[in-house]
Image (tube, rainbow, N blue to C red):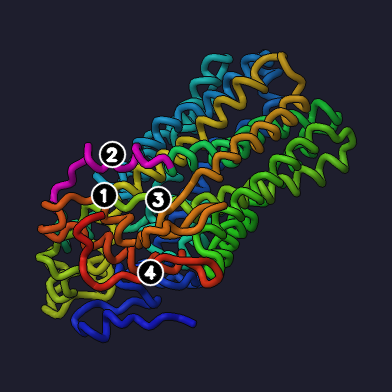
Amino acid sequence: MEKPDHTEEANPDRPKFALPVDSEHKATVFRLFTAAQPHMRAFHLSWISFFCCFVSTFAAPPLLPIIRDNLNLTATDIGNAGIASVSGAVFARVAMGTACDLFGPRLASASLILLTSPAVYCFSVANSATSFLLLRFFTGFSLATFVSTQFWMSSMFSAPVVGTANGVSGGWGNLGGGNFSQLKKSGDKHKENLPQVVRHAVTNYRGWILALTYGYCFGVELTIDNIIAQYFYDRFNVNLHTAGIIAASFGLANIFSRPAGGILSDIVAKKFGMRGRLWTLWVVQTVGGLLCIVLGRVGSLGASIAVMVMFSVFVQAACGLTFGVVPFVSRSAHGNNDNGDEGSGGGNSNSDGNDGDGGGGSSGMMAASSIVVVVAMAWSLGIISGMTGGGGNVGAVLTQVIFFRGSRYKTETGITLMGIMMICCTLPMVLIYFPQWGGMFCGPSSKGATEEDYYMSEWNLAEKEKSFHQASLKFADNSRSERGTRVGSAPTPTDETPIHV
């Protein structure tokens, strides 16, 4: 059942949204086949944009059997080019989280696309192994737009549906959209203490574990994108067209598999809370590792295709499940202070001169004004998303360096060993523990930790006195759904702001 927007009833001056929203103005439902603004409109514009980035980065691998002959590429050259295509995005993904906060996800992503588009164009004139490697390196930077995708969707959708939003947007290849410049005009942000926010993010061990596990689901996916067409072409002697179709089937599974991971994360969270999200992620990624081992062992074309399709479903679903957990790791939300009114009524949102009715302007500008607090609160979320996304590329680089560079291992042997590494790197999931919700094997803290205790620990007393923590309090309240209905949970706190956290 959809939750009514009680905040609008309490304050009729606030804008009305096409979708029901929570106290943070995040959508509490996900309606895929609508363009409701601002939530679903941003979603659709974003996944289409990121789809273009992903296609441009991985357009070359299906043609490698032809390219290697034309450019006289050795096995080492091909391996190095594959590594280059994902290594550049390691730093870019980490930096993108901060760039989204400084300039907004729309400008940060659009700027990166414009900078990398010349490299895509120049593929047609590559005439040596060196030029081919450099072009794959610079084109790969566009993969960093994935971080803006997850940043933006996590800021647009509430806890009960954030896994679904992140899963569908990531699976369909999206790029963060929206108009951040209007948001900055329609509300005040206090000056962020970047070193402090970075410290909160990088000292949270949960972010590093998720970066590791993501390195061996999305990192494995990137590796397969680079090697699979050539693998089928060489091992099973299929023609280039057939090898390309087989390789495409792996990527096309993202249409439903990654979204299914996000949806599954939200479904299990309704009953089992955060502990359900963690268990489901571990199980799905472990099964994906087992299927990866089998893929390297089977010797017939038909069986290899069947196993590859099943493997693609599980490894991509694990990616969606990962970003069902990421939004809850850290909320050092050094954000909106809007004169202490927790959102600022929509009646003053015509500061840019575009709205002259004195009553809050058009519905689009009112929507933009109302979600300024959402964008302003996402500092550490951007960094955690960048760390996790960067972990995916680090995993891809390490895997290709160890198993698929040169002729040390046969490709099928490398695939088997990659599956073993997948299983091993998923095991640290058992260490993730939230005091208010518990972990895979432990329930919530016996000390009665609450959501407010967890998220308020990222704020000092001076910031609380200035009400900078209000957005985090809202998120803490909205994230109580992560307790689930069939597991033990922390007590619901009073309305008072905790002093000691």
Residue for point 52% across, 72% down: 485
Closer to us: 78 or 466: 466
Residue at which label 1 appears: 458
In the picture, the disc for residue 198 is 2
Q: Callout 3 environment at 10 Å: few (<14), some (14 to 19), or many (20+)? A: many
Q: In which quarter of the image is residue 13?
A: bottom left
Whether residue 196 appears in magenta in the rendering, the answer is yes
Marks 3/1: CA distance? 11 Å
Q: Name the residue under label 3.
A: 329
The answer to which of marks 3 and 1 sits earlier in the sequence is 3
Residue positioned 49% across, 27% down in the render:
87
Identify which amino acid the numbered label 2 is placed on. Val
Q: Which residue is drawn at 17% across and 74% down?
A: 345
Q: What residue type is labelled 4?
A: Pro
Contact, mark 4 vs mark 3 (Cβ under 8 Å): no
Q: How far apart are marks 1 and 2 (CA)?
A: 11 Å
Q: What element carries label 1?
A: loop
Vertical side of 103 occupied by 368: above or below: below
Q: Mark 1 or 2, which is nearer the eye?
A: 1
